Image: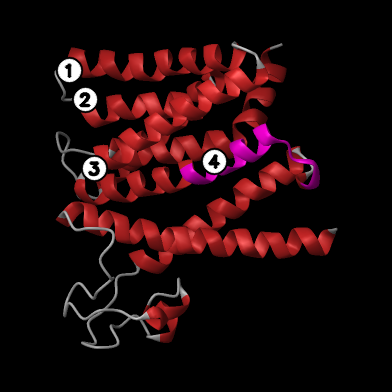
């Protein structure tokens, strides 16, 4: 049984690496308005890349961070995003085998696991895109929202329970409502419209208790990074910060540690 879990863990990590490579391609092509169906190419010399150039992490190391054809430097973003995506996929899988016996997964558990993998791809894409371009792309956000609503409706019907739908509806009300108030009060100066829409997706991913944890860590991390940037003079007080990037970090903290943090907090106050 242990060997089975180990082999499947390697598969999940490898799948995450491949999805990280997909995220890199997606963020690059979305920004330039390119099709995802075209073959990958070097952004410098435009030479078409073959399979050996596209192996996640390994190709970067084998080619010594240089294009095989024009010898221009390859950004460290590519292997870093691939590796992080692999780790996130592995952590999601490990979280599930701790909470459930993978052999006895039911339909709902399988959907939850698959949905978390899809959410991870969407979140990592938003993290990178907002960090680089200061915008959350609707072409990534809206499909995620639609998929989340469809899955939520399906699970509510399948389990014959409205509890799940009510929980996530309340979560959307908290996150989306909070961001909408900030947006309206500041007339878009404190938070962008993309972040407000992102609140809907976050409410679909997290139950309302974990949404509160996500918001707390988002603003704590954002404040710490903001202070560091101000002190180092890399940012001015009124300059934009990639709020979506911090929201993604807060979301992953809540996904992996939210239940533990919530239990610790309740034991502390009760």
> Cβ–Cβ below 8 Å for labels 2 and 1?
yes
Sequence-wise, the earlier of marks 2 and 3 is 2
Single out the mark in the foreground, 3 or 1.
1
Is residue 227 visible in the rendered image? The answer is: no
Question: What is the C-alpha distance between the residues marked 2 and 4?
Answer: 29 Å
Q: What residue does disc 3 label?
A: 230
For label 2, the SS is loop
Sequence-wise, the earlier of marks 3 and 4 is 4
Sequence-wise, the earlier of marks 4 and 1 is 4
Question: What is the C-alpha distance between the residues marked 4 and 1?
Answer: 33 Å
Q: Residue at x 35, y 34 (%)?
A: 223
Q: What residue does disc 4 label?
A: 116
Measured along the vertical axis of the image, is residue 201 above or below residue 119? above
The label on residue 190 is 2
The label on residue 186 is 1
Q: Residue at x 55, y 57 (%)?
A: 87
The label on residue 79 is none
């Amino acid at each position: 049984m242990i060997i089975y879990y180990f082999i499947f863990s390697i598969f999940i990590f490898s799948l995450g690496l491949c999805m990280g490579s997909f995220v890199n391609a997606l963020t690059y092509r979305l920004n330039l308005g390119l099709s995802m169906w075209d073959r990958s190419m070097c952004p410098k010399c435009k030479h078409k890349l073959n399979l050996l150039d596209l192996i996640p992490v390994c190709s970067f190391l084998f080619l010594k961070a240089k294009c095989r054809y024009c010898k221009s430097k390859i950004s460290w973003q590519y292997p870093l995003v691939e590796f992080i995506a692999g780790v996130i996929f592995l952590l999601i899988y490990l979280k599930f085998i701790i909470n459930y016996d993978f052999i006895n997964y039911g339909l709902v558990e399988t959907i939850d696991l698959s949905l978390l993998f899809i959410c991870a791809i969407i979140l990592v894409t938003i993290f990178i895109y907002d960090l680089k371009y200061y915008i959350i792309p609707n072409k990534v956000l809206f499909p995620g929202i639609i998929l989340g609503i469809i899955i939520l409706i399906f699970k509510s019907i399948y389990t014959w329970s409205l509890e799940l739908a009510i929980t996530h509806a309340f979560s959307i009300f908290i996150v989306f409502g909070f961001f909408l108030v900030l947006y309206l009060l500041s007339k878009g100066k404190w938070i962008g419209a993309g972040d407000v829409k992102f609140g809907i997706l976050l409410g679909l991913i997290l139950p309302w208790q974990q949404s509160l944890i996500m918001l707390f860590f988002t603003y704590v991390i954002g404040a710490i990074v903001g202070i560091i940037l101000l002190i180092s003079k890399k940012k001015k007080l009124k300059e934009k910060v990639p709020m979506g990037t911090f929201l993604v970090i807060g979301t992953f903290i809540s996904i992996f540690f939210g239940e533990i943090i919530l239990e610790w907090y309740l034991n502390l106050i009760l």
